[in-house]
Image (spheres, rainbow, N blue to C red):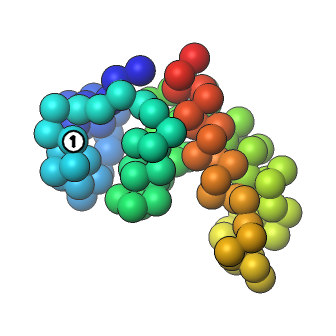
């Protein structure tokens, strides 16, 4: 799956995210694990938003993956042991698995 700034705009991404994406990937990018980490960690894009709007109906599996990985972070990321928490990692992986098909 390929993502472009245009695709984000059409999906209704906020201006800041579109700009950040375009700066990092002027010609768009393929969905790889590495690119998912950059988008959702470094650029702090919203993985739930992306799953909902870029992958049809993917939001729930991303939410479930996070909830299963860390009960404390189920709703908000308020973990006692962030270095050991697999919440973000699990959600990013779930997105990646859905996107690669
Ligand atoms: Zn956690």
Q: Is 36 positioned to the left or the right of 95 in the image? A: left
Does any portion of residue 18 appear in the rendered image?
no
Q: Is residue 34 left or right of residue 86?
A: left
Question: Which residue corresponds to the image point at 52% horizontal and 26% vertical from the top-left?
Answer: 99
Q: Which residue is mark 1?
A: 25
Q: Position of residue 89 (x, y in %)?
A: 64, 53
Which residue occupies the foreground of this view, 94 or 8? 94
Residue at image location 66% in from the left, 70% down from the top: 77
Vertical order, 69 against 27 (above or below): below
**Residue lying at 85% horizontally and 63% vertically, measured from the top left:** 71
56 or 33: nearer the viewer: 33
Image quarter in which the C terminus is found: top right
Q: Residue at x 61, y 29 (%)?
A: 97
Q: Is residue 96 left or right of residue 91?
A: left
Q: Is mark 1 within 8 Å of ligand 1?
A: no
Residue 24: x and y, percent?
Answer: 22, 49
């Amino acid at each position: 799956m390929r993502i472009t700034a245009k695709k984000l705009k059409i999906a209704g991404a906020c201006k800041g995210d579109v700009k950040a994406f375009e700066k990092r990937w002027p010609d768009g990018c393929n969905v790889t694990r590495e690119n998912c980490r950059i988008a959702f960690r470094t650029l702090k894009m919203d993985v739930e938003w992306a799953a909902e709007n870029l992958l049809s109906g993917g939001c729930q599996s991303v939410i479930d993956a996070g909830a299963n990985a860390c009960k404390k972070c189920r709703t908000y990321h308020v973990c006692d042991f962030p270095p050991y928490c697999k919440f973000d990692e699990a959600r990013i992986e779930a997105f990646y698995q859905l996107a690669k098909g």
